Image (cartoon, helix red, strand yellow):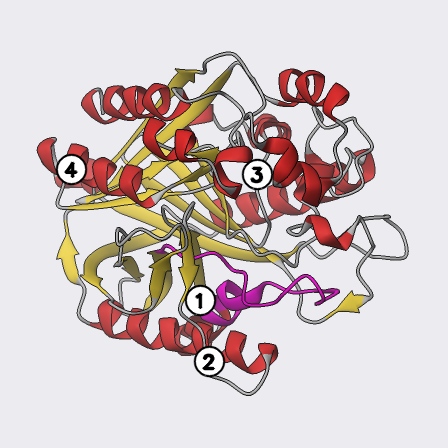
Amino acid sequence: MGMAQRRLRAGVAKVDITPDLSKIRIQLGGYGARLNMPPRGIHDPIYARALALEVGSQQAVIVALDHLLVPWSLTRRVAEATGLKPEQLFMSASHTHCAPDAMGLNERMRFPLPGVGTFTPPFLEFTTERVVQAVEQARRSMKPATLHLNAAALPNLNRNRRGRRLVDTTMSVARLDDTRSKPFAALVVYAAHPTIYPHTMMEVSAEFPGVLQNTLERVLGRDGVALYLNGAQGDVSPVADAGKDDHDRVQRYGGLLAQHAQHLLKDAKPASPTLRMRHAQARLPEAQPHPEFQQSAGREYKVPETLLKQIAKEVMPETAPISCLALGDLLLVGFPGEPISSLGLQTREIGHEAGHKYIAPVALVNDWIGYILTRHEYLKGGYEATVSFNGPDAGDAVMQSVREGVRTL
């Protein structure tokens, strides 16, 4: 392959996706206990950040959203409007629990439930338009770039909230520099639930991912964009105990992650500019509510048992995408929901066996099927299991497609 084809071009953009609360009736997502109350105001705005990549004839766009999740209806609309094929769009949500409820973007969610957002067409129109704007701006601003990669374990910053010792402590980063060796884009993957703010926080906020991204962007300078992707966070809490109140804790934790990311980005090593994408569809076992749903999530979300089976069947898709994107030696594996630590670590092994140096499992990419667990953890029950809607073997079905996606990459 000649050098001409191996040139990497990249472009970035950042667009405000905070809805006008007086125009679009939204509710704050993340906690059923808020019972669909609308936000009282904006603490800090939420954004869509896009990184457009091109190597030879290959093109892809990574999008980081300050949202709770990414339903397929949003992915499909954005892909259609931008002409991107499904495998060319890698769109992930940070999982902030203080954004407008992204279930309002989900065409399948047509049930009025007390603790969950209901599909709101104007909200989907608005969000699609803004995300498309970010994608198009990033593609228009593409320029020659060099790629640098790094990863390291960051102990004591996240923990397993299901009482297991197992947790993925790796932070993976990518840095893109222009021809004058000035960095203009940063990508950071790290696993932790943005749940530092409790359900009593009633203002829109990007939470710690917002602090992390904004801090890195100040370092990058004008026009620089930093994208945060959440890792295998299904059973992972942040270790964010320092601070005088919740706002302080959010600032400190986001700032601490930004500090670590900065060191890793500074020491990142040059990587060869290759780009490959692969999309595998996981066939999911039939949708069924977890036997314990009523005792945990049912209580939180106030779902009557009679409606439960019908909701599971209508809200859950029959297949869901596994999105693989390899940028140089970095393999991003996107899950359509929230994978637990053990599945993230398993993904890393699969990637290593396939010869990738850096492997980053990424949560909440391109679609949403709830929590993604091993059979063992599903049968153990608890909150995460009850927000897993395709029975005990859904995790195996997803991992089979991860293997297939990585193998055919």
Residue 189 in view here: yes
Viewer-proximal residue among 252 and 162 = 162
Q: Earlier in the sequence, mark 2 or mark 4?
A: 2
Residue most extreme to the bottom: 244
Which numbered marker is on residue 259? none
Name the amino acid type tagged 1. Answer: Gly
Q: Earlier in the sequence, mark 2 or mark 1?
A: 1
Bounds of the magenta segment = 190-213
What SS does tag 2 mark?
A: helix
* Apparent side of residue 218 relative to residue 103 in the rendered image (left or right): left
Answer above or below: position of 119 versus 12. Answer: above
Residue type marked 4 = Glu
Give the camera-side residue of 12 and 370.
Answer: 370
Q: Which residue is mark 1?
A: 224
List the residue tagged with mark 2: 252
Query: What's the distance in space between the residues labelled 4 and 1, CA to CA?
Result: 33 Å
Mark 2 to mark 4 CA distance (whole Å): 32 Å
User: Mark number for residue 349?
Assistant: 4
Q: Is residue 101 left or right of residue 176?
A: right
Q: Residue at 72% across / 28% down in the picture?
A: 109
Kindly indicate whether the residue at mark 4 contacts the one at mark 2 (C-beta within 8 angstroms): no
Judged left or right of residue 30, residue 93 is: left
* Rendered image: mark on residue 70: 3
Residue in the picture at 17% in, 32% down: 350
Inspect this view and state whether residue 223 appears.
Answer: no
Distance, label 2 to label 3, CA atoms, is 27 Å
Quadrant assignment for the C terminus = top left
In what element is the residue under mark 3? loop
- The picture places residue 383, in percent across and down from the top left corner, at 53, 42
Q: Quadrant of residue 52?
A: top left
Label 3 or label 4, whichever comes before in sequence order: 3
Characterize the local packing of mark 2: few (<14), some (14-19) or many (20 or more) Cα atoms within 10 angstroms: some
